[in-house]
Amino acid sequence: MLKVNKICILIGICVFVQQSLNAQNNTNSPYTRYGYGVIADRSFGAGRSMGGIGYGLRSSQQINPMNPASYSSIDSLTFLFDVGATLQLSLFNDEINSHRNINGNIDYFAMQFPVSRIMAVSAGILPYSHVGYNFNAVNDIDDISHLDNYSGTGGLNEVYVGLSIDIWKKRLSLGANVGYMFGNIDHRSAVRFGTSQQISSLYTMKKVNLRHLKYDLGVQYTHPLSRTERMTFGLAYSPKIKFSSVSYDVISSNDYFLSNIIKADTVRNSGFEIPNTLGFGASYVKDYKLILAADLSFQDWSNAHFFDDNNQFKNRYKLVIGGEYIPNNFTRAYLSRLRYRAGLNYSNSYLQINDSGYNEYGISLGVGLPMLDNRSFVNVSFEYVKITPESKTLINENCFRLTLSFTFNEYWFMKQKIE
């Protein structure tokens, strides 16, 4: 009965998370007006505390969808479930004006379990990108001022199922994810002009509906250094995909409900693409004491189309380093059993905005709090992200991000003895 109740709870959480992801608004950045928005962090709670590492991370206590080869590290009697939520404070300034916003939502959930001693499965849903902004601008045309309002919502999500298998002495493992990427991106603008006696308005809406299958391939090799120490090297690759799409472009002279439509177009299967992604990582692990890891990834955005145009993006690189330290895992002193984590990351933007872009710098601190069973954890991560534009005409952005996740570790496959 206990296991049945747990299954019902997990199903309820999954439904709630799926509904939350569909209505997500995890950002209010004006940069999300372009392209697919801001690219989401694919690592989960523990990895985010360490800067977002994952390609070379192999742990029996964490779900790591960044490299599907990691799933087979799970213990043969273990069921893992992970759910996370994020709260973000964003500060914007352009050397004249400043603004701040608070956003947050359920971020992801995933589960993982073994199917044999050398094979394991993972499944879940996680974000790929976020779109969310709302700002005004005053412009002049022929000495007539008009107020422009720009707003947008949406993003892309991914549902995945992955399989991993150990093919040689628990050292070499292969894995693959099959996912379904989906989402809507909605951009709206309103232009109001005229005198106080007579004001005219022009509303536009551009909406894109995107769908396609997605694949991830991964490999990890673990080299033992001693009975308690090892090095793991990981490589993951996601091939380029072209979305099935429907885009709507509507102009109205009345309101956002588009009751007085001037022009309306519907276009199917325009060129929308996600590029090849290649990631490499390495980690050093001393059991129950220390993790040190580094990742490097590359995305070939310069060859990706967006509305049939391949000149809107540039290649993106990301470098991450991070680690975890446990003072004493085998003591009753609670503070000594905590997982203390930290990380650094750097990436450039994939967007080209007026032939310019931005660089992103991040630092993270976190802690893993053992629950009563000493197998499950509450993971808390604090991140500071600074977005530095390459042009003075763009906006500076500072983000303070809190991620809270729960990793449940249960013995679901142990046979009960009958007295």
Image: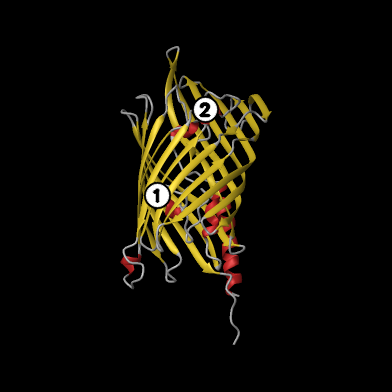
Q: Cα distance, mark 1 to mark 2? A: 29 Å
Q: Any mark on residue 302, and which?
A: 2
* Res 28 quadrant in image: top left
The residue that appears at 56% across and 59% down in the rendered structure is 112
Can residue 254 be seen in the rendering of this structure? yes
Residue 412 in picture, x, y percent from top left: 57, 69
Q: Nearer the viewer, residue 320 or 213?
A: 320
Task: Indicate the amino acid at tag 1.
Answer: Ala
Residue 402 horizontal/vertical position (percent): 39, 51
Residue 372 in the image: above or below residue 246: below
| Residue 366 in view here | no
Q: Quadrant of residue 140?
A: top left
Residue 272 horizontal/vertical position (percent): 60, 31
Locate residue 238 relative to residue 400 in the image: left or right: right
Earlier sequence position, callout 1 versus callout 2: 1
Q: Residues within 10 Å of mark 2 (few under 14, many from 20)?
A: some
Label 1, secondary structure: give it. strand
Callout 1 crowding tier (Cα within 10 Å): few <14, some 14–19, many ≥20: many
At 47% from the left and 36% from the top, the residue drawn is 133
**Quadrant, the N terminus:** bottom right
Q: Nearer the viewer, residue 143 or 250?
A: 250
In the image as oriented, which residue stretches furthest toward the top? 142
Q: Nearer the viewer, residue 223 or 152?
A: 223
The residue type indicated by label 2 comes to Ser
The residue that mark 1 highlights is: 293
Give the residue furthest to the bottom.
419
